[in-house]
Amino acid sequence: MSSTLDQYREAKQSWLKLRNQAKKELITRFHEVAAELNQIQRELLEDFGEKVALPTKPKKAVAKKASAAVVAAPVAAAPKQSPATSALHKKLEGQQKKLAEAKAAGKPTKAIEDRIYEIEDDIRLADS
C-alpha cells in the first residue's frame, strides 16, 4: 500500500511542478503578446494617426444593432435644413456614435448623454 501512496505523492509533486512551469510560461507569453500589442498600437498612432484602445468588455452584437437604428433615425428625418442645423445634426450623429461605443465598451456615458441633450436643445432652438 505504501507504494501506491508513494506513486501518488510523486505524481502530485510532478503535477505541481508542471503547473508552476505552465503558469510561468503563460505569464511570459502574456507579457510578450502585451509588448507586441503596445508596439502595434504605437505604430498605428505614429504612422497612421489612428488611436486604437483595447475594449474592456466584449462588445455585444445586440448593442450594435440598436445603435445603428438610433443613428439612422435622425438622418432620415432631415428634409431641408439650414447650414447651422445640419452642422448640429452632424454633431448629434457623432455623439450618438460615441455613446454607442461607450456603452459597448462599458464606459461611463453620462457626459456624452448630456452633450446629446444640449445638441438636441440647440437643434430645437434653431428650428423655432
Image: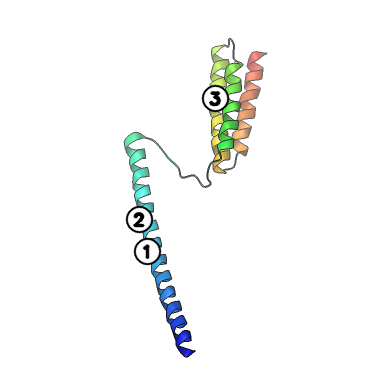
- Coloration of the structure image: rainbow
Cα–Cα span, label 2 and label 1? 10 Å
Q: Residue at x 46, y 45 (%)?
A: 54
Answer above or below: position of 30 versus 14. above
Residue drawn at x 53%, y 19% as measured from the top left: 87
Relative to 93, 45 lies left or right: left
- Dot 3 amino acid type: Lys
Q: Tell me the number on the disc at residue 85.
A: none
Q: Name the kind of residue labelled 2 in the image.
A: Glu
Question: Label 2 near label 3: C-beta < 8 Å?
Answer: no
Please report contact status of discs 2 and 1: CB closer than 8 Å, yes or no.
no
Q: Note whether 115 is above or below 9 in the view shown.
A: above
Work out whether mark 3 precedes mark 2 in sequence or the reverse, and give the earlier one.
2
Q: Residue furthest top?
A: 80
Is 119 displayed left or right of 52 in the figure? right
Among the two numbered marks 3 and 1 on one chain, the one whose residue lies closer to the N terminus = 1
In this view, 107 is above or below 14: above
Reading the image, the residue beneath label 1 is 25
Residue under pointer 3: 91
Amino acid type, mark 1? Glu
